[in-house]
Image: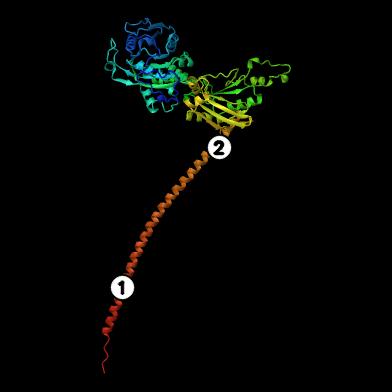
């Protein structure tokens, strides 16, 4: 068997195109896996799940199973048929996320395999997962579930297909995979593949992303999948990792109510779901983009940049202003002589602005999709940032450098970074390797001219909400005027069309009358010609008769 591809330099996947990995069918198992099974009641189904785990082809000595009893009454027990390294722990606090986190805290494996307590794996499922994890250390692998309506058997049979088929596929996952070329065609939300029923994750990715969000009522799998993507994950669907779900899921039974509850919470935490953030003015827990500005560059320069950002057409934004804010000690007696006056002014000006954070460090929430590093004093026009984000999103770029100024002293540039691309680059970078070069390999880097996106210095202050409202009112009034003019012109055209129709009808009638007159004239001409011929004939006859009637003169 071949050595695992994970040894040595980590393979570099661009975007989500995992096809470059090509893990061999035959490999030497080295990584350990922890299967975390949260359960609440359902002892019989749990027995079948553990029996399925006992049949796995992946080495038992590399596999541990942690069953988390989430307050069942009566308490759950471990059946006789189970993997040798199976533990039962309890988590009395209700909630699937809490139960999973309790199991995660006890897990020791290199890979975490989430498994629901009503999902029976086929014998080679875990091996199919681990084949990928041996190829790269930053993968999320999801198996293919089939939902069976068959009554759970008393004991797990040898032939699972004969027992559980016919069964329904996980339709929305199958559709997602098929319409994105197996998630390789740069899909915008590959993290949607992270479903907790039968998904495995590299443990270091989970450590970087953090545990499940216990505040969420529903949508925990999606939200954690999003954070895993932000930590640099590549998402892989594996059809060979098959499993049977014993009965339908809660979402299959009540999709609309489930989505209603899930979306209410997920919208605040997953900026990638843009359609859930339709409100133009509100703030969200995780913004779509965070801009970072040096607060020590002077009050006027900082204000020019920050105010322009707050006035941008991207309201889903936060601004971090960096500075030693904890050291400020304003002098109330001689404020104009305060050596830190500009810092005091910046702090006082933005202290109560909800979208501005006065920070001493460059740390940005890793769940934020994009970070803009903007030199103080430079300001984008209102739609400049939106167009930069469109460029990065549409082309899948990990870094967009914005050239602002070039001089003998050097280059001044802004940077729009995709957080997930830099997280992936940190995982695969070699010691001493330039991180931007690695980002170029895994996502792409581009340079653009700042002028093309409206970046200027010394920009005029934004109009503010009232000025923007007045401008919007004027624009609406002009739009209404143009709409009314358009309606008037349409009516005029309709009248012209109606009049033209009448003219066409009159022309047809006139053509008919002219045709009749022409036919009548032709008839009259024929009659006149006949009369003329008859008259000539009559004159000829009369002349002949007269000649015959005259007496002949005698001959001498």
The residue at the far bottom in this view is 556
Q: Dot 2, how many residues are within 10 Å of its Cα: few (below 14), some (14-19), or many (20+)?
A: few
Colour mode of the rendering: rainbow
Q: 149 or 53: which is nearer to us?
A: 53
Find residue 556 and name its label. Answer: none
Whether residue 58 can be seen here: yes
Q: Earlier in the sequence, mark 2 or mark 1?
A: 2
Q: Is 493 above or below relative to 290? A: below
Q: Is 106 above or below relative to 417? A: above
Q: Tag 2, which secondary structure?
A: helix
Q: 268 or 484: which is nearer to us?
A: 268
Q: Dot 1, how many residues are within 10 Å of its Cα: few (below 14), some (14-19), or many (20+)?
A: few
Apparent side of residue 430 relative to residue 150 in the rendered image (left or right): right
Q: Is 67 above or below relative to 199? A: above
Apparent side of residue 481 relative to residue 126 in the rendered image (left or right): right
Q: Tag 1, which secondary structure?
A: helix
Task: Classify residue 66 by image quadrant.
Answer: top left
Give the x, y percent position of residue 80. 32, 5
Find residue 533 and name its label. Answer: 1
Give the x, y percent position of residue 203. 44, 14
Find residue 478 and name its label. Answer: 2
> Which quadrant of the rendered structure holds the C terminus?
bottom left
Distance between mark 2 and mark 1 Cα atoms: 80 Å
Give the x, y percent position of residue 511. 38, 57
Q: Nearer the viewer, mark 2 or mark 1?
A: 2
Apparent side of residue 289 relative to residue 68 in the rendered image (left or right): right
Q: 461 or 468: which is nearer to us?
A: 461
Give the x, y percent position of residue 516. 35, 60
Whether residue 270 can be seen here: no
**Residue depicted at 29% across the width and 15% down the height:** 160
């Amino acid at each position: 068997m071949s050595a695992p591809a994970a040894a040595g330099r980590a393979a570099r996947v661009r975007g989500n195109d995992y096809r470059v990995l090509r893990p061999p069918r035959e490999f030497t198992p080295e990584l350990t896996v922890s299967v975390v099974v949260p359960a609440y009641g359902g002892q019989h189904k749990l027995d079948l799940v553990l029996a399925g785990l006992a049949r796995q082809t992946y080495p038992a000595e590399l596999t541990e199973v942690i069953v988390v009893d989430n307050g069942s009454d009566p308490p759950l027990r471990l059946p006789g048929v189970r993997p040798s390294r199976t533990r039962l722990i309890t988590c009395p606090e209700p909630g699937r996320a809490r139960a999973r986190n309790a199991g995660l805290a006890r897990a020791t494996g290199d890979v975490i395999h989430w498994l629901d307590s009503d999902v029976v794996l086929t014998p080679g499922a875990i091996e199919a997962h681990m084949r990928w994890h041996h190829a790269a250390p930053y993968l999320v692998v999801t198996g293919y579930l089939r939902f069976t309506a068959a009554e759970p058997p008393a004991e797990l049979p040898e032939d699972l297909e004969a027992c559980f088929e016919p069964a329904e596929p996980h339709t929305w996952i199958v559709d997602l995979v098929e319409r994105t070329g197996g998630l390789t065609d740069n899909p915008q939300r590959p993290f949607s593949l992270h479903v907790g029923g039968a998904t495995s994750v590299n443990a270091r990715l989970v450590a970087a992303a953090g545990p499940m969000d216990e505040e969420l009522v529903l949508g925990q799998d999606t939200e954690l999948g999003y954070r895993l993507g932000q930590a640099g994950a590549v998402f892989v669907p594996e059809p060979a990792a098959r499993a049977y779900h014993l009965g339908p899921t809660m979402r299959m039974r009540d999709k609309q109510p489930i989505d209603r509850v899930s979306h209410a919470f997920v919208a605040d935490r997953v900026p990638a779901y843009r359609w859930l953030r339709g409100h133009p003015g509100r703030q969200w827990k995780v913004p779509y983009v965070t801009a970072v500005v040096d607060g020590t560059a002077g009050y006027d320069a900082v204000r020019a940049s920050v105010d322009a950002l707050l006035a941008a057409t991207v309201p889903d934004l936060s601004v971090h202003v960096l500075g030693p804010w904890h050291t400020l000690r304003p002098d109330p007696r001689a404020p104009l002589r305060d050596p830190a006056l500009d810092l005091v002014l910046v702090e006082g000006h933005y202290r109560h602005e909800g979208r501005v954070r006065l920070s001493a460090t460059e740390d940005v929430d890793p769940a934020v999709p994009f970070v803009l590093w903007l030199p103080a004093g430079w300001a984008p026009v209102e739609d400049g940032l939106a167009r930069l984000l469109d460029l990065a999103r549409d082309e899948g770029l990990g870094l967009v450098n914005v050239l602002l100024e070039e001089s003998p002293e050097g280059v001044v540039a802004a940077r729009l970074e995709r957080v997930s691309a830099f997280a992936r680059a940190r995982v695969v970078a070699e010691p001493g390797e330039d991180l931007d070069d690695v980002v170029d390999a895994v996502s792409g880097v581009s340079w653009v001219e700042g002028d093309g996106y409206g970046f200027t210095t010394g920009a005029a202050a934004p109009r503010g909400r009232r000025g923007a409202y007045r401008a919007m009112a004027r624009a609406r009034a002009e739009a209404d005027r143009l709409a009314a003019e358009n309606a008037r012109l349409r009516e005029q055209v309709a009248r012209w069309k109606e009049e033209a129709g009448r003219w066409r009808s009159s022309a047809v009638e006139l053509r008919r009358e002219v045709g009749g007159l022409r036919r009548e004239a032709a008839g009259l001409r024929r009659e006149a010609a006949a009369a003329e011929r008859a008259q000539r004939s009559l004159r000829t006859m009369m002349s002949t008769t007269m000649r015959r009637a005259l007496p002949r003169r005698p001959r001498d």
